Amino acid sequence: MSFKPEIDEITKALATDFLHVYGVSSVRFVALHASSDIEIIGEYGFDQNRVGESTPAMTWRSWSGPDELIALTSTTQRWDSTAMMCSVPFFNRSVRAGFISLVFTEPRDEATRELIQSEVESYAAIVGLYLSLTDADPSLRAHRRLRHALIEQPINVDVELTERQLKILRGMATGKTNHALALELGYSVSTIRHETMRIFNTLNVSDRKTSAQVAIDMGLI
């Protein structure tokens, strides 16, 4: 795709261009991770910016009040009791990847709710397809913004890693230990350890997790 809008741009377009006729005031995209935690990855029209905010599964599944709809959407319900909030799931490769949540300026009657839900489900299918084609993880863009804000060290843009270091880096990104990498790649644990330190120095980081994050951001792995 030559044109790849950010998720915030998509939420704004849904609110202002496609769904405004139904009185939509706010739109929020919520990603559902493999861990069952959820994360807000895009929003438009809300007073408080919550993009990047994550919530553990045990917490959001017991929500009540305005946020309860997300918990209800994980079953079958799409509308809250006031008929002013609607939440529709979107899918990535047939797996539920998150929810599109809408807030309206006034309650919607039953006939209008059915029409809105049908239309939003169509948009959700498009959104899920777009995210599956652009990012393996629908929250990847939000993660990148957060990581760049949190990493204080300057990133070396002229990075040169050997093929062996790249293999080790890919292994570290998947959580493999030095011992596991040594067995897999056929090197000694000492060699893996020394190469790991060289990777840290090259990327200007101090730990395995940050090195993997930086490498992903830079497109090294």
Image (tube, rainbow, N blue to C red):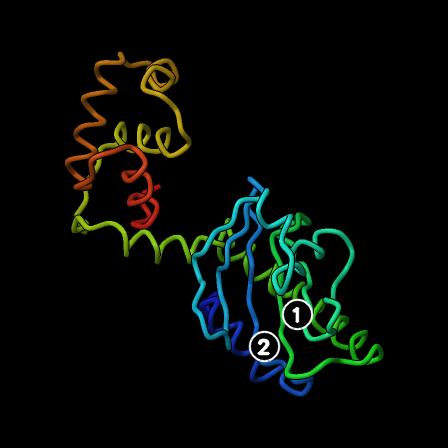
Rendered position, 220 above or below 171 = below
- Which residue is the site of mark 2? 14
Q: Which x, y percent locates residue 18?
A: 62, 81
Q: Residues within 10 Å of mark 2 (few under 14, many from 20)?
A: some
Instruction: Identify the mark at residue 48; answer none if there is no mark.
Output: none
Q: Secondary structure at mark 1?
A: helix
Q: Residue at x 33, y 14 (%)?
A: 186
- Which residue is the site of mark 1? 123
> Between residues 6 and 168, which one lies in front from this camera angle?
6
Q: Quadrant of the C terminus?
A: top left
Circle count:
2
Q: Which x, y percent locates residue 141?
A: 42, 57
Rendered position, 199 above or below 81 = above
Q: Amino acid at mark 1?
A: Tyr
Rendered position, 45 above or below 174 = below
> Between residues 21 and 70, which one lies in front from this camera angle?
70
Q: Residue at x 23, y 27 (%)?
A: 196
Q: Amino acid at mark 2?
A: Leu
Q: Secondary structure at mark 2?
A: helix
> Between residues 97 and 129, which one lies in front from this camera angle?
97
Say if mark 2 contacts mark 1, CB within 8 Å: yes
Q: Residues within 10 Å of mark 1 (few under 14, many from 20)?
A: some
Question: Does label 2 or label 1 sit earlier along the sequence?
Answer: 2
Q: Which x, y percent locates residue 150?
A: 27, 52
Q: Quadrant of residue 121?
A: bottom right
Q: Residue at x 56, y 76 (%)?
A: 26
